[in-house]
Amino acid sequence: MTKRVLVAGGGIAGTVAAIALHEAGYDPVVHEAHDRDSDERGAFVTLAVNGLNALRDLGLDPVALLAAGFPTPRMVLRGASGQALAELPLGGPLPDGTATTTIRRADLYTALRTEAERRGVPVVYGKRLVDAVPDGPGVSVRFADGTSAGADLLVGADGLHSRTRRALDPAAPGPRYLGLLNAGGFTSGPVDPALRPAPGVMQMAFGRRAFFGWAAAPDGSVWWFANPARRTPVEPGELTPAQWRAYLLDALADEPIPATELIEASADVLGPWNTWDVPRLPVWRNDRIVLVGDAAHAVSPSSGQGAAMAIEDAVTLGRCLARSADVPAALAAYERVRRPRVEKVVAYGRRSSSTKTAGPVGARVRDAMMPLVMRLLYRKGNPQAWILEHRVA
Ligand SMILES: Cc1cc2nc3c(=O)[nH]c(=O)nc-3n(C[C@H](O)[C@H](O)[C@H](O)COP(=O)(O)OP(=O)(O)OC[C@H]3O[C@@H](n4cnc5c(N)ncnc54)[C@H](O)[C@@H]3O)c2cc1C
C-alpha cells in the first residue's frame, strides 16, 4: 500500500488533507514554503459553514478550532447611497450553533497546523517545491533550498500559483486576473460605536470605484476589506504601503459608508493582492500526483468559498483513499466527486466578481432592481443552499 505522502503547501487544503490522509492510514509530511509565522495572502477569511461541516466530518471541532474568529452568519448588501439593498444568509447557524466564521488568516493557519502536529503529522517549513518527477513507482520532489525528498504520493496544495500543477501538466492554464485588487485591515483597537456595525452581520457596499466590506469583531475593533477595480494586476513592490493606503482612500473617498474612517483607524493596510481564479484545469491528477484547493481550482474571493472548497477537497481525498487501497482509482474517484461541484462554484464566484463594480448607469439599475430580485430569488428558500448545505460524500 502507498504510504509516504508529501503534501506541498501548509495552507488550508494542505493541512486538512494531511490530517485526512493521516486518518486514512497514510504517513503525510507537510512541506510549507514559508517560515512558520509568515502567511501569504489576505488579512482574514470568512469560512463558510459547508467548510466547517467538512471539518466536523473529519472529526475536528470547528467551534474550538476557530475560537479566535467570530460568527458572521449574515450579510447586508448596500447600494451607492449606503442604503441596505438586501440582507442575506452567509451560512448557519446550524442546530449546534455553528455558523459561517470570520477569522484572521494567520490564526486559521496556526490552528490547522497545530492540530495536524498534535495528531502526529510533521510540518516542515522553508520547503518550496520547485519540481516533481516520477521516480520508480513514486515521485521525487526538489525544493528551492537544493534539497529533495521522495514519496509514494504527492499532494499539491501549493495554492494559486502551484508548482505542482506545472509539474503535473506543463501545459496547464495559469490563473486569470479578475480586474479587482484586494486590501484588508483591522482597526487598531475598538472604534467609535457609530462606525461599528451590528455583530454577526458582514456589511458589503458597492462603492463607485471600489467594493468595501466590514464587520465588527467582539473586541470592538472592525475588520475590513476593499476591492478597488483595476484593469491590470499590480506588480510586486509597485506600490509602497503609503501609496497603497492613499490609493484606497482615494478610491473610497466621498462614499456614504465609514470606509475611509476605518482605513484611517488601522495602523496597517494589508495588500495589495490581485484577484484571480483558475479556469478549468484539464488535469488534476495522475497515478501519483493530485491537486487540492486553489492549486486545482481557485475560486474568486467574491464567492466566499475558496477556503471551504479547499477543505471539502481535502476531506473528500482522505475519504477516497480510505475507501480504496488502489491509489490511482482513489484519485480518480476524488476527481469524479469534486470536479463538477467546484467548477460550478468557480463559475458562480466569477459572476459575483463581475458585479462588484458597475458604471453609474449600471449602479442605478442595480440599486433599483436588487431588492426586488433578491426577494424573488430568496422567496422559495436560499438559492445558495446547494453551496452552503453541501455535505462531503
Ligand atoms: C485577498 C483574498 C481574500 C480571500 N477571502 C476569502 C474568504 O473570505 N473566504 C474564502 O473562503 N476564501 C477566501 N479567499 C480564497 C482562499 O484564501 C483560498 O481559496 C484558500 O486559501 C485556498 O487554500 P489553499 O490551501 O488551496 O491555498 P493557500 O491557503 O493559499 O495555501 C497554499 C500554501 O502553499 C504554500 N506554498 C505556495 N507555493 C508553494 C510551493 N511551491 N511549495 C510549498 N509550499 C508552497 C503557501 O505558502 C501557502 O501556505 C481569499 C483569497 C484572497 C486572495
Image (cartoon, rainbow, N blue to C red):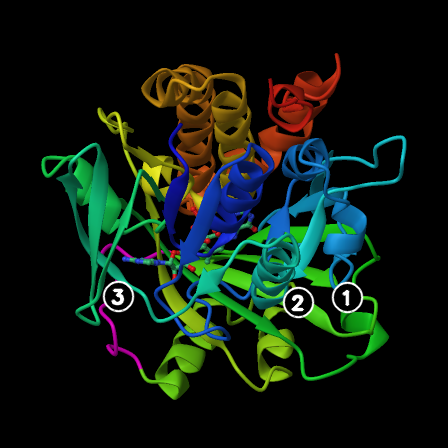
**Side (left or right) of 80 relative to 199:** left
Q: Which mark is residue 223?
A: 2
Residue holding disc 3: 234
Q: How far apart are marks 1 and 3 (CA)?
A: 30 Å
- Depth order, front residue of 45/187: 45
Q: Distance between the residues labelled 2 and 1?
A: 7 Å
Residues marked 2 and 1 touching at CB (< 8 Å): yes
**Does mark 1 have its CB less than 8 Å from ligand 1?**
no
Crowding at mark 2 (Cα within 10 Å: few <14, some 14-19, many 20+): many
> The residue tagged with tag 2: helix, strand or loop?
strand
Crowding at mark 3 (Cα within 10 Å: few <14, some 14-19, many 20+): some
What's the magenta region? 229-239
> The residue tagged with tag 3: helix, strand or loop?
loop
The spot of residue 110 in percent (x, y) is 60, 65
- Depth order, front residue of 274/376: 274
Q: What residue type is labelled 3?
A: Val
The relative height of residue 388 versus residue 323 in the rendered view (above or below) is: below
The spot of residue 331 in percent (x, y) is 37, 23
Residue holding disc 1: 217
